[in-house]
């Protein structure tokens, strides 16, 4: 009688799949014109020390911080010609493109956004003490591809339309929303995706204790949001997708251009006010009375309150209004400098939320919550000629860890007049 054997007994063992970057390194090493430059280096060990992960922002591949910095790689790179290195980076892009089915043309290594600027001398990597308010990605390591000239105007200078056109732009899609930026000049915070999704669902709540949040799409379409630190449109676009109109402020011209391009990619109308137009007699009330979805001021957000108050005064004369339902203050380590103006922007609105971003030690979150509430409550007008109201920290969202024992928190401050 025949015996049925277990087919797995004679099955060939599965071969370990070779990661794209490892495959590229192996092929590159075997095709070097002069293999002697590698000396006694073990190619398998070199490949094992290469990055295993990457992030795609079409058409760029971004490698994690610290890639190719092991002692073996530092030694090998010092012996290679620019042509040999270009061949290596090109092969890595080709292997990743082949695996994903999409063609990638640019390769870079990610680095953290420094809180302070570095000395102008590129050989000096010490920070010079000036705060990197514009959050310029000065640490980005370009490996392959044309990312635009280093001689282009920086974020602190005036940037011409020709500079924008000559720059390299990338894009991604999160929560169904397109975002665009120039990686040499503008940061992209991938970790904000959770908070952006929370904004999108903010008014869909069924939680009994948060019923004041519940609002329909038709109600939201008559409301405004204000973003005091717009960046490339991280939260601006979430409010716009809710159907709201948005007023926003941003200093970095490269971020403003990224926001403009991203808004158009999403099908939203956008008006950018910058340069000489800021010094002219710009009438925000006329813009508000129109139908532009997103209005961006490329200037210090210290101007936001004055511009909104003036627009409200003119609109009131025409029986119009500018109701601000949300003010987003998304700056780290603390957005506190704009809290008072943000509170003033919402003081005449029946109900509104301030979203205040802070880095807080895990043991201090509850204490900071009380401090935020007390500080905002002290800003409620007490003059009998002004509306009375109340404020409370309705919720504290823990977005992500910023450092060991430190959380990026968002304090949702709810205010209502009575």
Image (cartoon, helix red, strand yellow):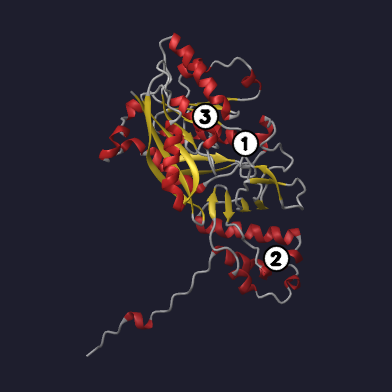
Residue 63 is at least partly visible in this image: yes
- Foreground of the two, 98 or 395: 395
- Mark 1 sits on what residue? 254
Residue 360: which numbered mark, if any?
A: none
| First-in-chain label (1 vs 3) | 3
| First-in-chain label (3 vs 2) | 2
- Foreground of the two, 398 or 222: 398
In this rendering, the count of numbered labels is 3
Can you give x and y, in whole percent of width and height, for residue 145 in the image? 66, 50
Q: In this view, does 38 lie to the left or right of 268?
A: right
- Mark 2 sits on what residue? 74
- Mark 3 sits on what residue? 248
Residue at x-position 27% and y-position 41%:
207
Residue 156's image quarter? top right
Kindly report the distance in space between the C-alpha atoms of the residues bearing marks 1 and 3.
Answer: 15 Å
From the viewer's perspective, is the residue at label 1 or at label 3 nearer? 3
Picture layout, residue 301 above or below residue 64: above
Q: Is residue 281 left or right of residue 157?
A: left
């Amino acid at each position: 009688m025949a015996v049925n054997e277990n087919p797995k007994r004679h099955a060939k063992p599965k071969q370990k799949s070779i990661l794209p970057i490892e495959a590229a390194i192996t092929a590159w090493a075997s095709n070097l014109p002069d293999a002697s430059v590698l000396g006694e280096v073990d190619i398998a060990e070199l490949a094992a020390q290469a990055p295993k992960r990457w992030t795609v922002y079409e058409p760029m591949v971004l490698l994690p911080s610290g890639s190719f910095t092991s002692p073996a790689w530092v030694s090998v790179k010092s012996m290679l010609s620019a042509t040999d290195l270009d061949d290596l980076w090109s092969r890595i892009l080709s292997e990743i493109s082949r695996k994903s089915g999409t063609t990638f043309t640019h390769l870079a290594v990610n680095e953290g956004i420094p809180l302070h600027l570095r000395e102008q001398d590129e050989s000096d990597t010490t920070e010079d003490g000036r705060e990197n308010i514009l959050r310029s990605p000065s640490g980005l390591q370009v490996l392959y591809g044309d990312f635009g000239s280093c001689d282009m105007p920086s974020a602190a200078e005036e940037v011409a339309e020709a500079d924008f056109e000559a720059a390299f732009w990338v894009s991604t899609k999160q929560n169904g929303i397109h975002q665009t930026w120039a990686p040499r000049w503008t940061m992209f915070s991938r970790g904000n995706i959770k908070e952006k999704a929370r904004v999108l669902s903010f008014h869909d709540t069924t939680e009994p204790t948060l019923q004041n949040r519940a609002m329909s799409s038709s109600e939201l379409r008559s409301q405004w949001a204000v973003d005091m630190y717009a960046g490339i449109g991280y939260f601006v676009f979430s409010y716009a997708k809710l159907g709201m109109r948005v007023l926003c402020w941003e200093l970095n011209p490269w971020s403003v251009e990224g926001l403009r391009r991203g808004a158009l990619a999403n099908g939203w109308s956008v008006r950018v006010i910058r340069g000489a137009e800021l010094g002219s007699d710009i009438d925000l009330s006329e813009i508000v009375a129109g139908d532009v979805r997103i209005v961006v001021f490329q200037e210090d957000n210290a101007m936001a309150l004055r511009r909104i108050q003036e627009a409200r005064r003119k609109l009131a004369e025409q029986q119009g209004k500018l109701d601000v339902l949300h003010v987003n203050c998304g700056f780290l380590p603390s957005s506190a400098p704009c809290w008072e103006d943000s509170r003033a922007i919402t003081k005449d609105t029946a109900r509104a939320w301030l979203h205040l971003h802070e880095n807080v030690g895990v043991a201090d979150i509850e204490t900071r919550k009380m401090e935020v509430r007390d500080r905002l409550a002290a800003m409620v007008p007490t003059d009998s000629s002004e509306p009375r109201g109340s404020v409370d920290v309705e919720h504290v969202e823990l977005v992500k860890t910023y450092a060991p024992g430190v959380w990026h928190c968002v304090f949702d401050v709810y205010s209502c007049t009575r």
